[in-house]
Amino acid sequence: MARLNISPFMVILLLGSVAVTILPGLAVPASSPAPAQQHLLECANKLGDCGKQVYFAVFVNGTTVTKDCCTRLLSVGKQCHHDLIVYATQRPTFKGNVSEILDKSEQVWNGCIHSTPASLFH
């Protein structure tokens, strides 16, 4: 069984409907995830601990993402970032305004582009 090193917080966010065993800093899927869920797990795994920071910046308090986490977010790619945000807004527990969250997500992405040296991505 494959082990994914992602934060329990992101696992709960991403896999609310999939049975998982959660250990501190480690999540082990109880069964093989569907391809779409596998994509989301891979995206979250690539973000690592920065996933929590990005989540709070988009969904909670609009804090600035650190340069290190911006670098990680940009290396993960816009599609992964977008897919994680959209997935979170589609969960039954989400009570916010989807348009506002998508706008904030775009602001976080653009803020990371402006705060990270372009040479890191060429």
Image (tube, rainbow, N blue to C red):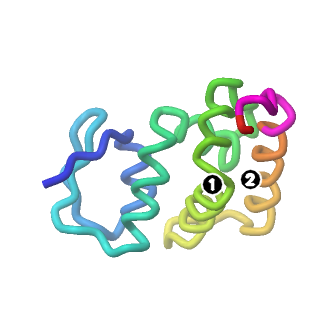
Q: What element carries label 1?
A: helix
Q: What residue is drawn where x is 74% and y is 53%?
A: 105
Residue 98, quarter of picture: bottom right
Q: In which quarter of the image is the N terminus?
A: bottom left
Q: Marks 1 and 2: which is nearer the front?
A: 1
- Residue 15, position as x, y percentages in the image: 37, 62
Foreground pick, 55 / 35: 35
Q: What element carries label 2?
A: helix
The number of discs equals 2
Question: Main structural element of the magenta stretch: helix, strand or loop?
Answer: helix
Is 115 contained in the magenta span?
yes
- Residue 51, position as x, y percentages in the image: 53, 41
In the rendered view, does 2 fall on the left or right side of 114? Answer: left
In the rendered view, does 12 fall on the left or right side of 57? Answer: left
Foreground pick, 104 / 38: 38
Tag 2 residue: 105
Residue positioned most to the right: 114
Q: What residue is drawn where x is 19% and y is 52%?
A: 2
Q: Look at label 1 and name its amino acid.
A: His
The disc placed on residue 81 is 1
- Judge whether 104 appears above or below 69 on screen: below
Count neighbours of disc 2 (C-alpha within 10 A) and say few if under 14, some if 14 to 19, many if 20 or more.
many
Q: Give the range drawn in magenta.
A: 113-120
